[in-house]
Image: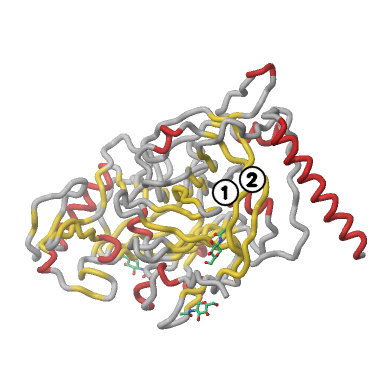
Amino acid sequence: MIIKAMELMNLQAYSHLIFLFSTLLSSQSIDLKPVRASSPPIQALVAPITKDAATSLYTLSLSGNQYLLDLSGPLLWSPCSPTHPTIPCSSGEYCAAVAPGAPNFGDGQCTCTARPTNPVTGDQAIGDLTLTDVATNATDGNTPTAEVTAHGAVSSCAPDRLLRSLPRGVTGDAGLGRGSLLSLPAQLYGKVSLSKQQFAICLPSTATAPGVAFFGGGPYGLMPPTQLDAGAALSYTDLVRDPMRPSTYSIRLRGIAVNQEAVPLPAGALDRGGGGVTLDTALPYTVMRRDVYRPFVDAFQRAMAHVPRMTSVRPFELCFDSGALGFTRVGYAVAPVDLMMASRGGGVGNWTVFGANSMAQVAPGVACLAFVDGGWAVESAVAVGGFQMENSLLVFDEDASRLGFSGTLLFVRTTCGNFNFSRD
Ligand SMILES: *[C@@H]1O[C@H](CO)[C@@H](O)[C@H](O)[C@H]1NC(C)=O
Ligand SMILES: *[C@@H]1O[C@H](CO)[C@@H](O)[C@H](O)[C@H]1NC(C)=O
Ligand SMILES: *[C@@H]1O[C@H](CO)[C@@H](O)[C@H](O)[C@H]1NC(C)=O
């Protein structure tokens, strides 16, 4: 047994060596041989999520670098060194996974390319697929336990200009998108033996304490005052497919209520045909298509008619004198917004958005309803942005095709900034 294991280790070391040589000696294509970890499954990997104050976007720390946290991106991409390894077209699985990329026939050789996209500007490029190592920490759910490296993850090269409008200092884009062979979660599931093929994000509300991403199963521990497994408080709704945008996470809403009164929306406005409801961390705030936005904002305004208004502050319309608003554990005391989810078993589960996730403090004394008018041309009826997801745990369970959501953790006196990142 022991000898067998040592042989195996030698073999692995040897293949790494060959890999290293072929990478060092030339920029020629190398063959892809995914190596599966043979050690016992790791419960989960953990990585910090940081909020960027200037852009209100979020970054994920991988291998000590910051990547844009891009929930609907299909790929991992970043600028490459000129001598990066490439992937030959003969490894068909990967080339096929990035269908829109055209093969590159430079040097008489066919190498796989992809089409990396900046999700903030919509800017696109064509880049080689290459290999990279992704280092994170394993966790027992409460603290990091040991570093784990996923060797030879596939990522796409991109020109430097593709980083424009992303937070300062980011290295690239971490696409967590659905159903893509090349998304970060799919690659971690393939390279590291994890207890469960699911991931969770908990976005921080300030730049001062990082939030947390978990790849794998719970518990998802947050520190005292009450040591809490945030995974214990989840409700579930189905993830549905958007054939036009397969890598987005879409859900079905049965309606929207303000102050527990249904917002009168045009028939079918929230249905798939009408564009559907997606989750998108590359949007700082939720964007609604005009036919949903107008009745929603009007309903909010009616519910808040007793509070003095202030001049609008772009991109928001409805702003209030925040000195006239009461304050609660869950933020300003404003009319709650219920996103009424279609849940398993036919009942309705609500994702209730309280002041902390509906009102943005844009200046001292001024707080605005943090939902944005997307006009008519947007692809989703509602695209839920990062601000509305802050301080709640969201679990993306691809196997069961469902989304777990905790609602605001502020009710249980904790925040996403309460994961203990110190290691013994
Ligand atoms: C693992 O966790 C430790 C402790 O928080 C941290 O110093 C280290 O940078 C982490 N490693 C990676 C690869 O993120
Ligand atoms: C969900 O929200 C609606 C509208 O506010 C409300 O009528 C309903 O009772 C809520 N359901 C649950 C389970 O809280
Ligand atoms: C955080 O984890 C470290 C290492 O396990 C531990 O020593 C420390 O007490 C923990 N901090 C809190 C506040 O629980």
Residue 191 image offset from top left, x and y in percent: 68, 52
Whether residue 229 is situated above or below residue 190 in the rendered picture: below
Residue drawn at (25%, 54%) of the image: 370
Residue drawn at (47%, 78%) of the image: 228
| Mark linked to residue 153 | 2
Label 1 belongs to which residue?
Answer: 184
Quadrant, the N terminus = bottom right
Residue behind label 1 places its C-beta within 8 angstroms of ligand 1: no
Whether residue 67 is situated above or below residue 333 in the rendered picture: above
Q: Residue furthest top?
A: 108
Give the residue type that dot 1 points to.
Answer: Leu
199 or 66, which is in the foreground? Answer: 66
Give the residue type that dot 2 points to.
Answer: Ala
Whether residue 330 is situated above or below residue 117 in the rendered picture: below
Residue drawn at (64%, 62%) of the image: 196
Q: Quadrant of residue 290?
A: top left
Residue 363 image offset from top left, x and y in percent: 15, 58
Q: Quadrant of residue 211?
A: bottom left
361 or 303, which is in the foreground? Answer: 361
Residue 337 image offset from top left, x and y in percent: 28, 62
Using residue 207 as the reference point, say whether residue 346 is left or right of it.
right
How far apart marks 1 and 2 lie (CA) works out to 8 Å
Residue 316 image offset from top left, x and y in percent: 20, 49
